[in-house]
Amino acid sequence: MRFCVRCGQEFPRDQLIQGYCINCFIRYIGLFEHKPVLEITICPKCHSWLFKGEWLTPTSINDVVKNVSLNELSKTIRRGLQLVDLDFISIVQGIGELRARLRLHVKTETATFTTVEEVPGRIRYKVCPRCISKGSGRYTHLVQIRFTRRNPPRTLLENLERLLEKLLLQSEIVNVRYSESGVDLELDDATLAKRIVQMVTREYSAKFTTSFKATRFDHRKGSWRGILTYSIRIPVFERGDVVIYKGDLYIVEDLKKNRVVLFNPSSRVREEVLLSVYWTGELKSPSRVEVERYLVIDVREDEIIAVSESTKSQLVYRKKQNTPQIKVGDTVLLIKADNIETIVVGAETGLLR
Ligand SMILES: [Zn+2]
Ligand SMILES: [Zn+2]
C-alpha cells in the first residue's frame, strides 16, 4: 500500500498515477495536457461530416461526437495514460456550440478506470466538395439575422438555432455561419429564403430590409443577376430592463412570446405590450440609465426620507395612496433614464437587473 501525495489516503501501489490516487490525479493534475475542444464540421446540404480530412457519410450527431471525441481526446490525454474507449452520454447544443458529456475508459500502466468528462466543442457548417460540384456553391440569397442589442441573451440565440435547425435540413442551404452577433444563411432558393424571413419575423416580432447587389448582367434574360440580402433585426428586451414606453419610464417585469409585461414604478400599473411596438418607437431602450440607491431613514405619515448610499444626499418621497408599506432600512431607487426620472419603492426594487 502507498499513500496519495495529495489526499494522504492509502491505496494499492498500482492504483496510483505519479503518486496521486486516481481521484486526485483527475482533480488536481487533469487527464489532458490541454483542455480539448471538439471541432465538428458538417455539410449543411447532405449532412456528411469531416473527419481527419475526409468527408464521411451522414450519421447521427451522437456518432459524430463520439468519433471526433475519441480522436481529439486521445491526442490531448497526458502521457502515461491511454484512452481505451468512450461512451457518449449526452450533448447540449447551443448556437454553433456544444458541450458533450462523455464517459471515458482510461488505462494507466498498471490500472484502468472510468470517469465522466464534459468537453466543449464547436459546430461549423461547410458545404462538402461533393455538394459544391453538384451545385455551383454560389448563393443568390443572403439572410442576415441580427439583434437590437449587442449581446443578446443565450436563451434567445439557442431558441433561434432550434427554429433554424428545422430549416437547415432543407437541401437548398449553401452555407450557415453563426457568430456572437447573429446568424448568416446563404441560400440559392428564393422561396426558402422568404420562408425563413417570414418565420423569423413572425416568431420574434422582427423587422427586415432587403437590398440587392448585382454581380453580372444576364444577356439572355436581359436582367441583372446578383445577391438579394435580407437583413433581419430581432428586438431584444430582458427582465429588469429599464424602458421607455409612451414617454414614461417602465421596468420589464416579464417576457412572453412576442410580448413584454411592463411595470410603471410611479403609477404602479402593469401593462402587457406587444413587442412589435418597438418598431413604432412607442417602446424604447433608453440610451443611458442611471440608478441611485437610497436608504430609508425615516417614514412619516405623508412622506419617506431616504439618504443616498453614495452621495449622502437626501430624498423626500411624498407618499401616494398606492405607495406600499415601507420601513426604515428599506431601499429606494432613483432611476434616471434619458431625461425621465422615477422613484422605485417596495418589492419592485428587486426587479431591476
Ligand atoms: Zn488522493
Ligand atoms: Zn454535402
Image: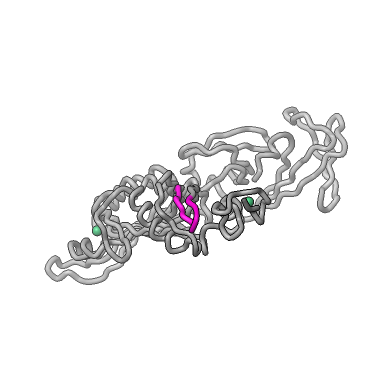
Q: Is residue 29 left or right of residue 320?
A: left
Location of the C terminus (image quadrant): top right
Residue at left 74%, top 30%? Answer: 324
Q: 274 above or below 210?
A: above
Q: Could you tell me residue 82's position as x and y percent?
A: 45, 58
Which residue occupies the extreme front position in the image? Answer: 1
Residue 15 or residue 314, whichever sits in front: 15
Number of numbered callouts drawn: 0
Q: Could you tell me residue 175's position as x and y percent?
A: 31, 60
Q: In this view, does 219 lie to the left or right of 289?
A: left
Is 111 a magenta residue? yes
Q: 246 above or below 69?
A: above
Residue at left 49%, top 50%? Answer: 117
Residue at left 68%, top 51%? Answer: 8
Q: Is residue 281 left or right of residue 306?
A: left
Q: Could you tell me residue 106's position as x and y percent?
A: 46, 53
Main SS of the magenta part reads strand
Q: What stretch is highlighted in magenta?
A: 103-112
Which residue occupies the extreme left position in the image? Answer: 220
Residue at left 26%, top 58%? Answer: 56
Residue 144 appearing in the image: no
> Colour scheme used in the picture?
one colour
Residue 132 or residue 234, whichever sits in front: 132
Q: Could you tell me residue 344's position as x and y percent?
A: 72, 40
Residue 279 or residue 79, whichever sits in front: 79
Residue 79 appearing in the image: yes
Is 157 a magenta residue? no
